[in-house]
Image (tube, rainbow, N blue to C red):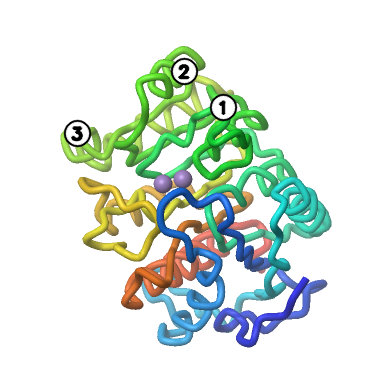
Amino acid sequence: MLGSKTNFADANSPLDEAEFVILGVPFDATSSFRSGSKFAPNRIREASYNLETYISEYKVDLLDVKIHDAGNMEEYLVIKELWEDIEHVISGLSKNKMQFPIAIGGEHSITPPVVKALKPKAAIVIDAHMDYRSEYLGLKGNHACATRRICDTVGPEHVVVIGVRSFTKEEEEDAIESGLKYFTAEHVREYGVGPTIQEAHRHLYEETNDGAVETYLSLDIDGIDPAFAPGTGTPEPYGLTHLEAKKIIASFTKYLVGFDVVEVCPPYDNGNTSMLAAKIIRDVIASVWMDSLFVD
Ligand code: MN
Ligand code: MN
């Protein structure tokens, strides 16, 4: 583990006291188009300092929340080794006293070991891409396979992808056949974000599970339209607005056991995409903290 020069803002608690643990994973070795997401953890940390500690929407001051910044994983070239080490780090977090992990990528291939360690009963993925190939360029760990790998742990019928608008015919057929539920960005626009959220909740908590269950949320920043989040490796037009994404995320925070933001790519960012990622992380912390049992 490497320290980072700067902690995420207000992440001043030691690990053993922390309710939230931030982990940077600067890995972008499988990126297919524009690499550079390995610079995102530190850039998002820097951006976090420009936001107020008080989050009025949730009436939470982050100075009251115990957050630990664990720094960055070392840079790996072999994904198998990275996965083993991420799983080890996340598994090491306290289970008695809930420690909520927030992983900052890096590319989307960093998510599967976090999910594997947490073993949630449901998962939400916000992404422009289906990421449902069984392998890509000979690699099961490629970022184009992230949702497929999440499904390996959670089961496709317990996973919902929202904002998707880029996939192969084969991925589409596989998704339908395996029971992976997905809502395109077009669907969200056509039927509205509220009804889409309701459908997603119904699918995860009524149709495939007996009530609300522990849920993981993975935010591939390219799920949000490039107009709002241009600093990403594989931008795809016609996406969700930042406010639609915010609403979707907020609807799940009371069920979350972990969260990640991936695919922010600083070389293509004027700063706004890192800022959006920092803002979303802070909102998730505030909202999860408000909803959690460990509030005194
Ligand atoms: Mn992805
Ligand atoms: Mn994507």
Question: Looking at the image, which residue is at 62% across and 82% down?
Answer: 7
Please tell me which of labels 2 and 1 falls first in the chain. 1
Q: Amino acid at mark 2?
A: Asp
Residue receiving disc 2: 174
Judged by depth in the image, the label closer to the viewer, 1 or 3, is: 1
**Residue 43: percent from the left, percent from the top?**
49, 77
Asked which secondary structure carries label 2, the reply is helix
Question: Looking at the image, which residue is at 64% across and 87% down?
Answer: 5
| In this rendering, position of residue 86 left or right of residue 59 | right
How far apart are labels 1 and 3 at the CA level? Answer: 31 Å
Please tell me which of labels 3 and 2 falls first in the chain. 2
Judged by depth in the image, the label closer to the viewer, 2 or 1, is: 1
Which residue is the extreme one toward the top?
177
Disc 3 vs disc 2: Cβ atoms closer than 8 Å?
no
Please tell me which of labels 1 and 3 falls first in the chain. 1
Q: Amino acid at mark 3?
A: Tyr
Q: Nearer the viewer, residue 141 or 12?
A: 141
How far apart are labels 2 and 1 at the CA level? Answer: 10 Å
**Residue 103: percent from the left, percent from the top?**
61, 60
Question: Looking at the image, which residue is at 62% across and 37% down?
Answer: 139
Residue receiving disc 3: 191
> Looking at the rendering, which quadrant does residue 266 occupy?
bottom left
Asked which secondary structure carries label 3, the reply is helix
**Residue 230: percent from the left, percent from the top?**
29, 63
Residue 284 sits above or below residue 195 on the image:
below
Q: Quadrant of the C terminus?
A: bottom right
Disc 1 vs disc 3: Cβ atoms closer than 8 Å?
no
Disc 2 vs disc 1: Cβ atoms closer than 8 Å?
yes
Residue receiving disc 1: 134
